[in-house]
Image (cartoon, rainbow, N blue to C red):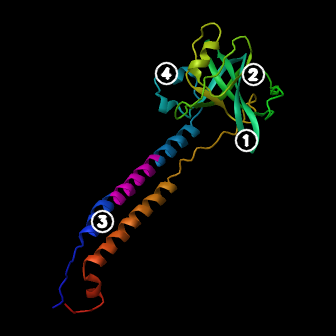
Amino acid sequence: MPRLRFDFEWRLTLFVVVALPIFLALGFWQLGRADEKRTLAANAAVKDAAPALAPEELTGLDTDDLSGRKIRVSGSYLPRVFLLDNQIKSGRFGNDVVQLFRAENNQVYFVNRGWVPADPARQRPTQIPQRPTVTAIEGRIYVPPGKPYLLEPDTLDASSPLVTIQSVDIESLSTLVIGGSEVFPHLVRLLSDDPTAFDASWPVVNISDAKHLGYAIQWFSMAFVLALLFIHRSSNVWALLRGNNED
């Protein structure tokens, strides 16, 4: 009667005991990340389909709920303009135009109107095209994933209506808001069809779960192959499956 035999080599066994749980844990971690991406995609779809909110409707929403929400604000642009430096679009150098917008309730918004071309040598001033005067704007609230790292802070000249900046740090830039008005704490990116927008084709954040599912399959496959090799090396199960009845 053929018998199943095991012969465990301690170094191989130790490697498998350590590596197999790691591979499985990484696979399940990637599945968790895929679930997170699906949740983000579902939330983004809901926000995309929702109508634009008025400022008073934002009360009580936390940062996650605010991010990506469409907002419609009535008011007018202020003269203060910031040029976000070193913005590359389709291989061309330019600036994002960030302008202050005062709402009817006197709250001030930092509004990114989109990209305009600029001189890469920075010898000529950036030309800002004229747009029609409006009494309301529509955009999306943008909450960055974190503060950008800068070698040195921006030099802010309060006497100039046009200021070049390296990042939109609303907390720091708020010092240039005249009159002590309340400042909305997040950037608003204009919708591409807003009449005051320039090139407002914003980068699309990848929230697909496909990459994480692919990584999960890779980790689980590695765990499966490792288990098969361990069984093959440590037992006679393959000989039994081939019908080799020799002890």
Farthest front residue in view: 11
Q: CA distance from mark 2 to mark 1?
A: 27 Å
Residue at mark 1 to residue at mark 4: CA–CA distance = 35 Å
Badge 1: residue crowd in 10 Å (few <14, some 14–19, many ≥20): some
Foreground tag (3 vs 1): 3
Q: Which is more N-terminal, label 3 or label 4?
A: 3
- The boundaries of the magenta stretch are 22-36
Structural distance between the alpha carbons of marks 3 and 1 = 49 Å
Q: Which residue lies at the image location 48% right of the left edge and 33% below the top edge?
A: 64
In the rendered image of this protein, does residue 98 appear above or below residue 20?
Answer: above
Which mark is first along the chain, 4 or 1? 4
- Crowd class of label 3 (few under 14; some 14 to 19; many from 20; radius 10 Å): some
Residue 181 belongs to magenta span? no
In the rendered view, would you say 231 is above or below 180?
below
Q: CA distance from mark 2 to mark 4?
A: 25 Å
Mark 4 residue type = Thr
Residue at image mark 4: 59
- Compared across the picture, whether 136 is left or right of 186 comes to right
Q: Is residue 107 among what the camera can see? A: no
> Which residue has dot 1 on it?
89
Question: What numbered label is drawn on residue 16?
Answer: 3
Q: Nearer the viewer, residue 87 or 205?
A: 87
Q: Which residue is mark 2?
A: 134
Q: Residue type at mark 2?
A: Val
Q: Earlier in the sequence, mark 3 or mark 1?
A: 3
